[in-house]
């Protein structure tokens, strides 16, 4: 990968002396853009360009070449790659279009290029891309019109070349620059995941920004991004939230977990911050590149106008921040320097006539307060003092403190010079309080993530399935069988569970309820095991064996919500009632769902009252099992109180899922809601996640509801479907 960013010599195949050709634009940017290595121009027509010879063929160029840029028609690209291979070139950029994006013939051509590259240990960027930029080398392999982006400390890896080009132009107007920029195009070979380690190692890069339209190997991205994020922040804008079309699902989890939930869970696991707009992404990137991280979410707001201060205060909570309470000593010192009508509470309103000295002194007092971890300074146009003088007075205070301070410079023409003062000092400023608060929220999220990683006892393994499984003769592992283990050990699953997994049917589709409960029981999840009655007489016999009270449910692979068809009965207290209920449930199901295949009725012991939760897993094609936790029973679709994570989970992640939902937070009790056994829920969630990761054919598996009491947690109903 180093050949892309530090090539000693570059060959441009398809160089052109016609200014309207891409081969001319690339040659111009390479030669006139300051690149200090050798540039060999190649075109069968020969000639000269920018005072340099154009060689008729690659074979006639002198010396070793590290990087080739192929501006040739798509059908000619395979032969051009073979020529590169003969010269020992190990890196190539293919800006040309006409490949996978153009249809089946183009896809076949792209695959041919990829095979040539792999056979010759060559890496490819593209095709259908604009190339790469490194502003510090400098290196510009693109065909974009000058000027290039400003030199800066943000790296941008983009799936869209047009977007990258627009961002370059926009960034110049905003006054910030890039260290590296890569347009990945079709990603036939090199992906954003391949480029992350190099960006992490680049001393000129402080923040890595991603524009993603998809991901190929999701698990590999997670592993690589986790290693990168510890070194440098990674920010992503992933398109496609408004997914068109619903996928067939046999569970609430499958119905409510779209692909974007999997991306959210993957980014959360990797420590990648996700954004909805480019503006928010770059607002946060600039703050992360320039500012220290806060020690807490306690924030002070300093302003000379009440309205903007209120806007900032209102925005804090949405970013996990809070309004700090200055200590008594800080307030006394503020009152001593502020006008009598000013407010020493937070937000600190110094009034419109606040001078540069008052701004600086007030900020110094706030930052010295141990209760305050960060600050926003709001500067609308001052009626008395030039705001650029206020900015100049603030800079020494900001630079002398280990706490982040974000300026909000409100206005346009009157404050343009003020923005320039901050920009010259390497500090971003924001036109509105809400944007500054979002950027400050990113600083706080990164600080929390790094602290959590530091406190984690061990790195989290995110293998999507069990690798190298030994024969099923292993004894049961305490990691599965015991109730006190921290994590489910995928390397030692119980032999009983492995035996059941081997007996799963070969065909896809829903599993019988008894089979699902058997899997859960073997995985160590406590269940109210159901027994199937195929006649009223058999229902009476089973009822007598189980004891009373009982719950009876219709059993059918075609009925998703049993209660919707009158297929659930509670409080069955006698053999006679069980027999009559069997008949009644079948008749009710036949009326409500005449096309459904009815297998009979299941009987289970009725659980004690308690809280109800949903635990589920649905297999995502990119990331593997996507776990869900939230409100269960009849509330699941109405509340949509679900949080998602990727299996397998550790305890830290399991608790995070619980804390993201009302169902999880109320386990510890809330007002009239009695506390129940939270640890039993965590254990059930860990075990279900381990089961989902162990069996790659499980398309979906769901426990709904999981009845949680003081004594433990019991799966009352469950369903699963095989791929």
Image: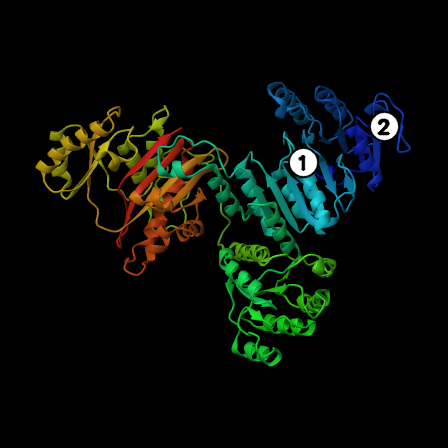
Q: Secondary structure at mark 1?
A: helix
Rate crowding at label 2 as few (under 14), some (14 to 19) or many (20 or more) other CA atoms within 10 Å. Answer: many
Identify the image quadrant of residue 76: top right
Identify the image quadrant of residue 568: top left
Residue 40 pos. (x, y %): 84, 31
Identify the image quadrant of residue 550: top left
Instruction: Specify which label sits upstream in the sequence, 1 or 2.
Output: 2
Q: Is residue 665 left or right of residue 592?
A: right
Give the residue displayed 71% in from the left and 35% down from the top: 131
Q: Which quadrant holds the C terminus?
A: top left
Q: Is residue 606 left or right of residue 201?
A: left
Give the residue displayed 70% in from the left and 51% down from the top: 174
Residue beneath label 1, please?
Answer: 162
Residue 713 pos. (x, y %): 29, 48
Give the residue displayed 55% in from the left and 43% down from the top: 223
Residue beneath label 2, please?
Answer: 17
- Considering depth in this image, is 72 or 283 the residue closer to the camera? 283
Q: Is residue 336 above or below residue 462?
A: below
Residue 251 pos. (x, y %): 35, 36
Q: Which residue is farthest left?
A: 576
Q: Secondary structure at mark 2?
A: loop
Q: Is residue 496 above or below residue 339?
A: above
Rate crowding at label 1 as few (under 14), some (14 to 19) or many (20 or more) other CA atoms within 10 Å. Answer: few
């Amino acid at each position: 990968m180093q050949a892309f960013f530090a090539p000693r010599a570059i060959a441009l195949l398809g160089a052109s002396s016609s200014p309207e050709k891409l081969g001319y634009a690339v040659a111009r940017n390479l030669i006139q853009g300051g690149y200090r290595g050798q540039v060999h121009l190649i075109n069968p027509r020969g000639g000269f360009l920018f005072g340099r010879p154009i060689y008729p063929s690659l074979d006639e160029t002198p010396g070793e070449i590290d990087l080739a840029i192929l501006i040739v028609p798509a059908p000619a690209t395979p032969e051009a790659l073979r020529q590169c291979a003969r010269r020992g070139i190990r890196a190539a950029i293919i800006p040309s279009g006409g490949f996978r994006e153009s249809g089946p013939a183009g896809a076949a051509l792209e695959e041919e290029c990829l095979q040539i590259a792999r056979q010759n240990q060559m890496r490819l960027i593209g095709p259908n891309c604009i190339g790469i930029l490194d502003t510090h080398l400098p290196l510009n392999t693109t065909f974009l019109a000058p000027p290039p982006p400003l030199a800066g400390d943000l790296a941008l890896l983009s799936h869209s070349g047009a977007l990258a080009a627009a961002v370059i132009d926009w960034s110049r107007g905003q006054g910030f620059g890039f260290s590296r920029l890569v347009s990945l195009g079709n990603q036939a070979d090199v992906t954003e995941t391949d480029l992350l380690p190099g960006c992490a190692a680049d001393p000129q890069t402080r923040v890595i920004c991603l524009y993603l339209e998809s991901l190929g190997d999701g698990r590999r991205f997670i592993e690589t991004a986790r290693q990168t994020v510890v070194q440098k922040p990674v920010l992503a804008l992933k398109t496609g939230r408004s997914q068109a079309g619903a996928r067939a699902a046999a569970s609430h989890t499958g119905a409510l977990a779209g692909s974007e939930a999997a991306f959210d869970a993957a980014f959360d696991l990797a420590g990648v911050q996700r954004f909805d707009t480019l503006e928010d992404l770059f607002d946060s990137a600039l703050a992360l590149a320039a500012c220290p991280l806060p020690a807490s979410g306690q924030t002070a707001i300093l302003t000379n106008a009440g309205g903007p201060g209120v806007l900032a205060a209102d925005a804090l909570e949405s970013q996990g921040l809070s309004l700090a309470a200055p200590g008594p000593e800080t307030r006394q010192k503020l009152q001593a320097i502020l006008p009598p009508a000013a407010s020493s509470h937070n937000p600190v309103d110094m009034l419109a006539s606040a001078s540069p000295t008052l701004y600086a002194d007030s900020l110094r007092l706030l930052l010295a307060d141990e209760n305050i971890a960060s600050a926003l300074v709001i500067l609308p146009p001052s009626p008395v003092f030039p705001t650029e003088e206020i900015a100049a007075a603030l800079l020494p205070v900001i630079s002398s403190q280990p706490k982040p301070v974000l300026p909000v410079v409100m206005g346009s023409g009157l404050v343009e010079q003020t923005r320039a003062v901050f920009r010259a000092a390497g500090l971003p400023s924001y036109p509105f309080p809400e944007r500054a608060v979002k950027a400050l929220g990113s600083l706080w999220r990164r600080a929390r993530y790094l602290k959590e990683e530091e406190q984690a006892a061990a790195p989290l393994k995110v293998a999507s399935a069990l690798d190298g499984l030994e024969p099923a003769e292993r004894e049961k592992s305490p990691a599965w069988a015991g109730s006190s283990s921290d994590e489910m050990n995928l390397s030692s699953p119980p032999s009983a569970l492995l035996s059941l997994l081997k007996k799963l049917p070969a065909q896809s589709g829903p599993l019988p309820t008894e089979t699902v409960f058997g899997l859960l029981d073997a995985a160590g999840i406590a269940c109210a095991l159901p027994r199937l009655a195929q006649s009223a007489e058999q229902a009476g016999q089973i009822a007598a064996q189980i004891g009373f009270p009982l719950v009876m449910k219709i059993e059918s692979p075609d009925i998703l919500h049993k209660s919707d068809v009158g297929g659930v009965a509670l409080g069955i207290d006698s053999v006679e009632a069980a027999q009559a209920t069997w008949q009644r449930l079948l008749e009710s199901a036949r009326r409500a769902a005449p096309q459904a295949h009815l297998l009979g009725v299941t009987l289970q012991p009725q659980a004690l009252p308690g809280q109800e939760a949903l635990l589920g897993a649905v297999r995502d094609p990119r990331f593997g099992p996507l776990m869900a936790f939230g409100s269960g029973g009849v509330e699941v679709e109405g509340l949509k109180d679900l949080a998602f994570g990727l299996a397998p989970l550790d305890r830290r992640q399991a608790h995070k899922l619980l804390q993201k939902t009302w169902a999880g937070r109320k386990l510890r009790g809330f007002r009239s809601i009695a506390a129940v056994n939270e640890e039993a829920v965590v254990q059930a969630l860990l075990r279900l996640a381990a089961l989902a990761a162990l069996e790659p054919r499980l398309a979906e598996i769901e426990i709904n509801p999981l009845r949680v009491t003081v004594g433990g947690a019991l799966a009352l109903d469950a369903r699963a479907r095989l791929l």
